[in-house]
Image (cartoon, helix red, strand yellow):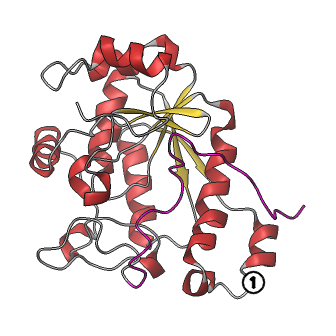
Amino acid sequence: MTEWPPGGSDDLIETLQDRYLPDLGHVDMPGLLLDRRLGQVALVSSFGTESAALLHYVMTIRPGLPVVFIDTGRHFPETLAYRDLLAERLRLNLVTVGPDSALLAAEDKDGDLNESDPNMCCTLRKTFPLQDALASFDTWISGRKRYQADTRAALPAIERDGAHLKINPFVFWQKDDIAAYFEAHGLPRHPLEGRGYLSIGCEPCTRPVCPGEDARAGRWAENPDKTECGIHLGPDGRFARAGRRS
């Protein structure tokens, strides 16, 4: 196994690791997802191109688990329609959250903050709402995978995300594994995938992926130094609502 990043391990993570993921040949993800030591658990989904596979997989293990979706107000209409389709088909316990309207009015009154400060735009529209939504949970489930980008190549299956534990059930899966799962379970594809969108976020900051690019190359393509939206705090992450207006 790849070593955890600094600050990325603790007694609980080590115990869970030894029990459910001692090595790549012995991965018991269903057992991990059912372990009571995870506490209160939610799955966070963007309803992107591979989300249906993770949603179906987790719901077969823990049906009724809350599924948190962050409605930033900037999603493609196709994403919202796909969310509704999957919510009905998979009978999801969907929890939709969104940004504080007063905060947006104060900080992004013209609706173009993504152009001048994309990090702050993500903070207002994604990070703040998610942290509020996760306040009553101990653990959250993410759809990140190692194959998606070089920046995720050493991603662990179990990690600390600020005060929360985070599980990445598909971390070791490859693109072909995801495709085979879709086929085996007859899952519908995101309507934008066929148009070259392999990783889908907010409409203003997402473009189709060009041949030879990694799956996340279409995210913030005009801002090469930005590779994540900011909802993943990391093992040493500290969430602070600096500058929030009441």
Instruction: Say few, some or many: other residues with alpha carbon within 10 Å of mark 1 (under 14 / 14 to 19 / 20 or more).
Output: few
Is 174 placed above or below 149 here?
A: above
Q: Nearer the viewer, residue 98 or 144?
A: 144
The structure residue drawn at horizontal position 23% and vertical position 76%, both measured from the top left corner, is 209
The structure residue drawn at horizontal position 59% and vertical position 40%, both measured from the top left corner, is 162
Amino acid at circle 1? Lys
Taking the view exactly as shown, the residue that stands out farthest to the right is 246
Q: Nearer the viewer, residue 36 or 97?
A: 36
Residue 190, given in percent of the width and then of the height, sits at: 28, 61
Q: Which residue is mark 1?
A: 109
Q: Nearer the viewer, residue 77 or 146?
A: 146
Find the magenta span and give its range: 222-246
Is 233 placed above or below 121 here?
A: above
Residue 126, given in percent of the width and then of the height, sits at: 59, 60
Judge whether residue 149 can be spotted in this image. Answer: no
Does 106 sit left or right of 68 as displayed?
right
Predominant SS along the magenta part: loop
